[in-house]
Image (spheres, helix red, strand yellow):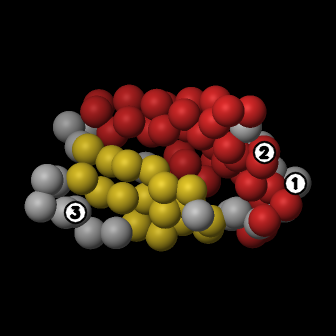
Amino acid sequence: MEELLISIVKGLVEKPEAVTVTVDEKDENGVTVYNLHVDEEDMGRVIGRQGRIAKAIRTVMRAAAARNDDKIQVEIN
């Protein structure tokens, strides 16, 4: 899952070497949180107009996790 998120985001940004993901442990609800870190200059590219790109990234990630009977959440930091 982590590799999928990184590959999606690296295609969007100007500085792909600055893309990192940290994964938190599952919480009491069984949700794994993926914290996405990008360069400040690339933040707008990842979020998109009115958050459309960020929403699309979260949708793709949730769909991929559902195939593995997993629950995830993507936070963009």
Looking at the rendered structure, the secondary structure element under dot 3 is loop
Residue in view at x 16 percent, y 54 percent? 30
Of tags 1 and 2, the one toward the viewer is 2
Q: Residue at x 34, y 69 (%)?
A: 24
Q: Residues within 10 Å of mark 3 (few under 14, many from 20)?
A: few
Q: Is residue 72 left or right of residue 17?
A: left
Residue at the disc numbered 1? 14
- Residue under pointer 3: 26
Residue 53 seen anywhere in this rendered image of the structure: no
Is residue 27 shown above or below 70? below
The quadrant of the rendering that contains the C terminus is: bottom right
Snapshot quadrant of residue 40: bottom right
Give the class, few, some or many, for how many residues have Cα within 10 Å of label 1's Cα (few <14, many ≥20): few
For image coordinates 40% across by 67% down, the residue present is 23
Q: Which residue is tagged 2?
A: 45
CA gap, disc 2 to disc 3?
A: 28 Å
Quick check: marks 2 and 3 in contact, CB under 8 Å? no
- Residue nearer the viewer, 57 or 43: 43
Q: Amino acid at mark 2?
A: Arg
1 and 3 marks in contact (CB < 8 Å): no
Residue at the limit of the structure toward the front, as seen here: 50
When the figure is inspected, residue 35 is found, relative to residue 53, above or below; the finding is below
Residue 52 x, y percent position in the rendering? 64, 30
Marked residue nearer the N-terminal end (1 or 3): 1
Mark 3 is on which residue type?
Answer: Lys
